[in-house]
Image (cartoon, grey):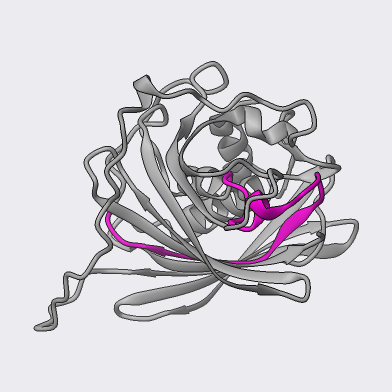
């Protein structure tokens, strides 16, 4: 099942099937879960004038390879901003929650342009796409990831963090215009910034994930994006980090911040 077919199910049914190929260990990849909830939010708000401003995802429990139910509730629809909550249910329990704000542009005399400048990378065609390690999560095959700076996960690096190119894998996904739901699916594919410090393979999972949508997408699924992550703090089994995503034209698309549970 393609992402497009999954989105169509979400539009037409309360219960939807999880497509094959998205496992992250024994559970479903969190980015796919977030993307499903975002698409439910988009079709529920159903207003092209109101674009995503920000969203917060809490991964309450593991989503298994089984049908899930999506529910959505508009908490408030004001003149400028609509706030919506979406939940994913499985086994009669809430497994993930998305809280999102959509808004229309408003006149303002306050304008600040202090966006992080996109890093200068060699062209992705001159670099090597990361090979899928046999022990790596199944979902990694959905994307092409190219490390430019920093180390690979589980290499006992003395420092965290990395940056690189990313795009949807052209063998797994037909090219089409990219949506905000696709953005959430893709941006969470990079491992947490502390994973290069791992000495051995061990789990890490997102606990909360907040995304600010800066400039509207004007990209297709198979276009390249630049990604860079920075870890603020890690200790006692948790880490907090933020990441930036730019398109091929160095336009800042999104800023994400997450809290990660660390099992190493």
Q: Position of residue 154 (x, y in %)?
A: 71, 45
Q: Quadrant of residue 239?
A: bottom right
Is residue 203 rendered magenta in the image?
A: yes
Q: Quadrant of the N terminus?
A: top right
Residue 113's place in the image compared with 19, above or below, is below
Residue 252 on the magenta segment: no
Residue 150 image position (x, y, % from top left): 51, 46
Q: Residue at x 31, y 28 (%)?
A: 123
State whether residue 100 appears in this view: yes
Residue displayed at 43% across by 68% down:
54
| x and y, in percent, of residue 64 in the image | 84, 46
Q: Residue 90: percent from the left, percent from the top?
A: 84, 55
Please say if 34 is above or below 179. Answer: below
Residue segment shown in magenta: 189-215
Please give the name of the residue rendered at 42% of the width and 31% of the height, measured from the top-left corner: 221
- In which quadrant is the C terminus drawn? bottom right
């Amino acid at each position: 099942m393609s992402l497009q077919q999954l989105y169509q199910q979400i539009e037409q049914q309360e219960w939807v099937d999880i497509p094959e190929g998205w496992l992250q260990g024994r559970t479903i990849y969190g980015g796919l879960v977030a993307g499903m909830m975002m698409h439910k939010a988009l079709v529920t708000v159903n207003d092209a004038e109101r674009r995503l401003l920000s969203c917060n995802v809490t991964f309450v429990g593991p989503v298994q390879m089984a049908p899930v139910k999506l529910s959505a509730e508009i908490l408030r629809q004001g003149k400028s901003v609509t706030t919506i909550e979406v939940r994913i249910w499985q086994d009669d329990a809430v497994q993930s929650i998305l809280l999102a704000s959509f808004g229309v542009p408003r006149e303002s005399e306050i304008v600040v342009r202090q966006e992080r400048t996109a890093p200068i990378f060699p062209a992705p065609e001159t670099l090597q796409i990361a090979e899928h390690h046999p022990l790596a999560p199944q979902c990694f095959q959905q994307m092409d990831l190219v490390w430019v700076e920093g180390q690979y996960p589980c290499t006992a690096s003395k420092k965290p963090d990395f940056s690189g190119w990313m795009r949807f894998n052209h063998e797994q996904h037909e090219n089409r215009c990219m949506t905000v739901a696709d953005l959430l699916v893709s941006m969470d594919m990079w491992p947490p910034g502390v994973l290069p410090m791992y000495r051995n393979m061990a789990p890490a999972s997102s606990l909360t994930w907040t995304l600010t949508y800066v400039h509207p997408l004007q990209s297709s699924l198979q276009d390249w994006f630049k990604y860079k992550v920075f870890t603020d703090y890690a200790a006692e089994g948790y880490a907090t980090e933020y990441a930036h995503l730019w398109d091929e034209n160095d336009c800042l698309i999104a800023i994400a911040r997450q809290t990660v549970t660390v099992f190493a």
